[in-house]
Amino acid sequence: MGNNLLKGKRGIIFGALDENSIAWKTAEKVFEEGGTFVLTNAPIAMRMGKINELAAKCGAEIIPADATSVKDLENLISQSVKILGGKLDFILHSIGMSPNVRKGRDYGDLNYEWMLKSLDVSGISFHKVMQVAEKQDAVNEWGSIMALSYIAAQRTYPGYSDMAQAKSVLESIARSYGSRYGKLKNVRVNTISQSPTPTTAGSGVGGFDVFLDFAEKMSPLGNATAEECANYIVIMFSDYTRKVTMQNLMHDGGFSTSGITDDLVETLTPGN
Ligand code: NAI
C-alpha cells in the first residue's frame, strides 16, 4: 500500500528490461504511489516482451524509443503528453550500455566507435531527453528529472571501463541542465549514485560479484537494493524534494564515505 505521494503526477520511465531492473521496481512503486506513466525502452529490448507484463500491471502504455535518437524522443515525449492527458511531472532515465564492456575489450584497447556509443547511450542521451522535453515545453513547473549513476564517475573500477567516462558525462549534464531548467521552469534535475545491484547491466561488468561483496562489506548499512533505490526515486519525484537539484545523491549504504569497516578488517586480517 502506498501513500499517494505521486497522486496526479504523470511521467515517463525509461529502462525497464526485466523484473530486476531498477526502472521496473521504480514503475511498480510509482504506480503504488498513484502516479501514471508511459514505459519506454529501446526497440531491441522490447523483443524480449517482458515489459508488456509490467505495462499490464501498471495500466501503462509502451512507446519504443532509442534514447540516442532525437526523432524517437520527439515522438515519445509528444505522444506521452497526449496519452497521459497533460504535461509531465517526472522522468526517469535508467539507461546504461557499453559495447566495450559487453564485448570484453581491454581499457588499453578500446574501440573508439564503441566508446562514442557508450557515451551517447549512457550519458548524452540524458541531455537529448531534456532538450526535447524543453523544446516541447512538456514538463510542468516543479517537475523532477532523474538519472542513475555509479561511483565509478569519481573513483576507478577497472572492469567499469568507458562506462566511468559515461557516468561522469551524465552527472555533469545533470548539473548543467539542472541549472538551466531550474531557472527556466523550476524543474529539478538530479542523479542517484546507486550501490552495485544485480541486474542485467550490473552483472555485465567484469568482476561484478567481487565488488558486490566488497561494497557490501564496505557499507555500514549494506548495499542498497533496486527496490530501495525505487523508493528513493519516488521521494525525489514527490513534492517533498522540490528544492533538491543539480546533485549527485549517494544511495550506497555509506560506501562512499567509508575508509574501512570492521567487516573488511575482519576479512583481511591474516589467519581469518
Ligand atoms: P538494466 O539492464 O535492467 O537496465 C538498463 C536499461 O538500459 C535496459 O532496459 C536497456 O534496454 C536500456 N537501454 C540500453 N540502450 C538503450 C538505448 N539506446 N535506448 C533506450 N534504452 C536503452 O540494468 P539497471 O542496473 O537497472 O540499469 C539502470 C541504470 O542504473 C543504468 O544507468 C545503470 O548504469 C545504473 N546503475 C546500475 C548499477 C548496477 O550495479 N546495476 C549501479 C549504479 C547505477
Image: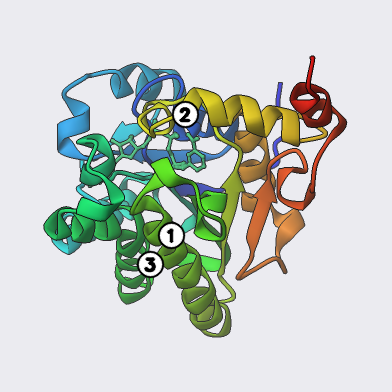
Label 2 neighbour load within 10 Å: few <14, some 14-19, many 20+: some
Residue 224 at least partly seen: no
Q: Quadrant of residue 34?
A: top right
Dot 3 falls on a residue whose secondary structure is helix
Q: Is residue 180 above or below residue 223?
A: below
- Residue 193: x, y in percent? 59, 50
Q: Which mark is residue 235?
A: none
Residue mark closest to the camera, 1 vs 2: 2
- Residue 114: x, y in percent? 17, 53
Q: Earlier in the sequence, mark 1 or mark 2?
A: 1
Q: Residue at x 51, y 58 (%)?
A: 153
Label 3 neighbour load within 10 Å: few <14, some 14-19, many 20+: many
Q: Which mark is residue 208?
A: 2
> Would you say the residues marked 1 and 3 are in contact, meaning their CB atoms lie under 8 Å apart?
no
Q: Residue at x 87, y 30 (%)?
A: 262
Mark 1 = which residue?
87
Dot 1 falls on a residue whose secondary structure is loop
The quadrant of the picture showing ligand 1 is top left
Residue mark closest to the camera, 2 vs 3: 2
> Would you say the residues marked 1 and 2 are in contact, meaning their CB atoms lie under 8 Å apart?
no
Q: The residue under label 1 is which amino acid type?
A: Lys
Q: Which mark is residue 130?
A: 3
Tell me the quarter of the image containing the N terminus. Answer: top right
Residue mark closest to the camera, 1 vs 3: 3
Q: The residue under label 2 is which amino acid type?
A: Phe
